[in-house]
Amino acid sequence: MLYQNITQKQQLKIHPQQLQMLHLFHLNTIELEQRIQNELEDNPLIEQNTDPDLATSKNDKEDIQDYQDWDEFAYDDSPSYHAKYSQQEQMPEKPIVESIDFRTEALTQLSWLQLPVDEAELAEFIIHSLNEEGFLEGNAETVADDYSMKRLKIVDAVMVDKVIKLVQSFEPVGLAATSIQECLAIQLKRMDTKRPDVKYAIRFMEEFYQDLKARNFNRIMDVLNIDEEDIKIILDLLGTLKLKPVPKGDSTPVQYDTIIPDFIVTQEDETLHVSLYKEKASSLKISNSWKAKVKNMEKGQGTGDQATSKYLSNKLNAAEWFVNAIKQRESTMLKVMKAIVKVQFDYFNTGDELQIKPMILKNIADMVGVDISTVSRITCNKYVQTPSGNVLIKNLFNEGIANQEGVAVSVRKVQETIQQVIQEEDKTSPYSDQQIAELLARKGFKIARRTVAKYRDELRIPAAQMRWNTIHHRSAAA
């Protein structure tokens, strides 16, 4: 028998060109240049104007120079100031230490493995996504979203989680950990897991981490059936571990990549000006000769078969869309950045991070009149050059909390206060999260203990017991 069923469902369909537009918003300056270069190679109808500022003028070549080459310098018998510089000083024999970035080491270890192409590309992406301390910011789902958007390849979170665990097996130990808890657990699992203290320490990290942070030792002792002496042995073991995969002052020197900003904010008197680091829309154009040829072929006046005419017509449409998309990208980016500067004027004017005001993506989206996803793509993985240095734009977004006067205060200012309180504490008797919450309340920030613990974890500051244990271990080692 035949049955008819009525079903109702919702589907979100994105036009391919809209997806490509979001992808263009997501690209930073270097990635955009590569994208434009690929389009120039693929589409003959797009042309790029030569930047006159980069071209060497003929007059520059005709400038008078002291010496054109080595032969002229060597056989010049006229006495001059250069004679005292002609003698070569003896070079030092001490070899120069080669600096190796931990990412370079990880990529080298990756090259030793025989992985499928898709897993190798994903692992390389994860390694380049690590911050300067070796942590992976975000979980498998966020990494999957970033990878899918940047590479235009759909990848699921299960595969990302598998590759993350693979990278975590590299050196230095703890690499690609997403938190201090995971960093400590990775180090413990590299030890002899048959040792009782290591076994219990792993359970501390996996099952009782929150109790450890809250110093709820009684519950841990009841569940694991251990005594205070065992607790002390385990805490001493945890004190020997490093809290970060690549701690500051590590023996391995770290090379920092040169940051190429996407925006430039300059200050003139009391006015802030926003501009793009490199404008590409003005240098791109459609070839007039090819455009005329395509139009003639569409009218049947040119030479060529129907397939050629259709191919060139599609290329013309793609070229026109791409050039207009670059113009729209740059126009929208400037609007978004100007709105951010307007909200964070005090920060850009002074360079003081405590002046950063509460700001979320929706605030900027409403000011510019675009979707929140557009603002998210534009501000993701992009830097702005300010008079105080390069700033990651996403760091300017933060939620706020109300102080005793009811004024919204940025989370960054609260975190800065927490960090200052911990720095000024007695190292032999560190403050607990509850004590920090009470001290913050006296300063006008009334937040819960669990909120203090959250912000402290974001600052990658360990709990009070771990801070005390680290100091105790260092003192004992000394």
Image (cartoon, rainbow, N blue to C red):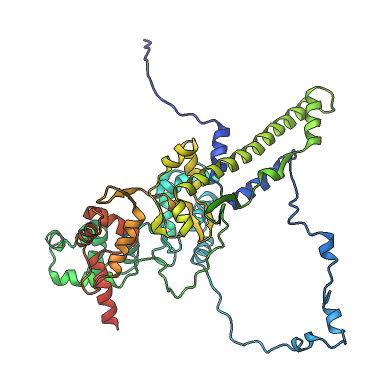
Q: Nearer the viewer, residue 462 or 403?
A: 403
Quarter residue 43 falls in: top right
> Left of 176 or right of it: where is 389?
right
Quadrant of the drawing holding the N terminus: top left
Measured from the top left, where is residue 66 in percent x and y?
A: 82, 76
Q: Is residue 372 visible?
A: no
Q: Relative to 313, say whether 476 is above or below.
A: below
Measured from the top left, where is residue 156 in percent x and y?
A: 44, 43
> Left of 227 or right of it: where is 250?
right
> Left of 58 or right of it: where is 475?
left
Quarter residue 47 falls in: top right
Q: Nearer the viewer, residue 458 or 425?
A: 425
Q: Residue furthest top?
A: 1
User: Residue at the spot x=41%, y=25% of the render?
Assistant: 10
Quadrant of the drawing holding the C terminus: bottom left
Quarter residue 164 falls in: bottom left
Q: Residue furthest front?
A: 269
Q: Nearer the viewer, residue 163 or 102?
A: 102
Q: Is residue 219 visible?
A: yes
> Left of 234 or right of it: where is 386?
right
User: Residue at the spot x=37%, y=18% of the render?
Assistant: 7
Measured from the top left, where is residue 439 in percent x and y?
A: 22, 61
Q: Nearer the viewer, residue 191 or 213?
A: 213
Measured from the top left, where is residue 113 in percent x and y?
A: 51, 60
Q: Relative to 417, say whether 371 is above or below.
A: above
- Count of numbered circles in the view: 0
User: Residue at the spot x=59%, y=51% of the render?
Assistant: 29
